[in-house]
Amino acid sequence: MPHPQQAVLVGRGHPAIRATHAKTFELTAEPAITPRATCVLAVGTVLDPNLAPLRGRVRLTLATPGLPALTGEATLNPRRALTDRAVIRRSRTLDADTLAVDSTLTADDLPEEFAAALTDPEREVTLTVEELGPSRPLLRVTFGDRTRLPAAKALVSRETIDVSRETVDLTIAEDAPPKEVAATNAVLERAAAAGARVTVPGPHKPLEALLAAGLPPYPCTYLGSPQRLSTLPLTAVVFHMPPASSAALFAGRDVWIEDTSELDLGTAVMHTVAAAAVDTPGVLTVVGPASSDAEPVDLTAVARALTEAGIAPRTLTEALAPFGLTRKRLYALLNEQDQT
């Protein structure tokens, strides 16, 4: 779904405007301020709803009639909310009121004549926020009763055209038939090829990373560390890379790491090699399944060995249930073991 690439906020001046703050500037919807509000440049501001879909690096243009406009750049805060104030910061403070960070323009940068003009309550003040350059497409993934796929042309490879600004939606049905699962996987592969960022409602960064890699959402597991990778050869695995890891743990499997170079919505990942991945401690990491001819883990043998080592059956079933070892299956195994 195409979205506007700019938004315009419109406010007016106020006699108490000072424009002396060296780290921020602000446009507020409040009708009045006190001289203590040294960052405020306009009151009675009407926020443009087109602000909501804007992303990434933006150009800021501050204007008032009869004077040269002032410009700067900033990065939109992906955690922002559209409230009654828009704060632009030089720092990276990501609270809900902060519209943008890393700004090259602050209140203190205004020329004296410009700042003085803003004390006129009849004067209009506008702030235009315009996206700069190409940004990755954004794939919004939700889970529901029915699978809904984006149009085939919505996500295209960055190798064929410039990276799209499109925002597309994918709904995944939890009990989808095989044909829908295959179609969903094809969408994920296209999204990964286009370098898309992926966003899932709620705090599901591991799942976002998995989907951004173009992998199906299941079967997969989230590990605290990669030490148990060898026991899950046919499963995609997500974890935060611990320090001092060995590349040998990945045993030739595909590896992706989170791309943290952009402050943006959703999660993006980059395909990399194991040797490079272990040099990024703390970064969200995805390891794909091994080749299809890999030997699956014999859960029965694992359960037998752990039982003989004194692990309680209840603990075993809690730990191994996600991999298909149910309590009923375990007790059948133990009964069989007792009879031999």
Image (cartoon, helix red, strand yellow):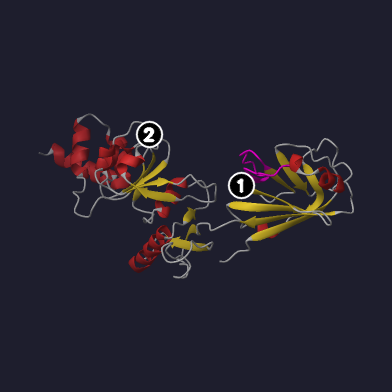
Quadrant occupied by the N terminus: bottom right
Dividing the picture into quarters, in which one does residue 339 lie?
top left
Relative to the observer, which residue lies in front, 321 or 197? Answer: 197
Q: Which mark is residue 259?
A: none
Report the label total: 2
Q: Is residue 208 left or right of residue 234?
A: right
Q: Is residue 296 magenta?
A: no
* Badge 2 amino acid: Pro
Within-10-Å neighbours for mark 2: few <14, some 14–19, many 20+? some
Few, some or many residues within 10 Å of mark 1 (<14, 14–19, 20+): many
Which residue is outermost to the left? 340
Real-space Cα separation, disc 2 to disc 1, in angstroms: 28 Å
Give the structural element (helix, strand or loop) at label 2: loop
The image position of residue 216, as x and y in percent, is 37, 56
Magenta-drawn stretch, dominant element (helix, strand or loop): loop
Specify the farthest residue to the top.
310
- Which of the image's four quarters has the C terminus? top left
Q: Check disc 1 and give the amino acid type.
A: Asn
Q: Picture quarter containing residue 175?
A: bottom left
What residue is pinned by disc 2? 242
Query: In the picture provided, is 244 more to the left or to the right than 6?
Result: left
Q: Position of residue 185 (x, y in %)?
A: 37, 62
Horizontal side, residue 180 vs residue 131: left or right? left
Residue under circle 1? 77
Question: Which residues lie in the magenta part?
Answer: 89-106
Residue at left offset 44%, top offset 56%: 195
Q: Earlier in the sequence, mark 2 or mark 1?
A: 1
Residue 104: within the magenta?
yes
Q: Nearer the viewer, residue 111 or 204?
A: 111
Quarter of the view holding residue 325: top left
Q: Secondary structure at mark 1?
A: loop
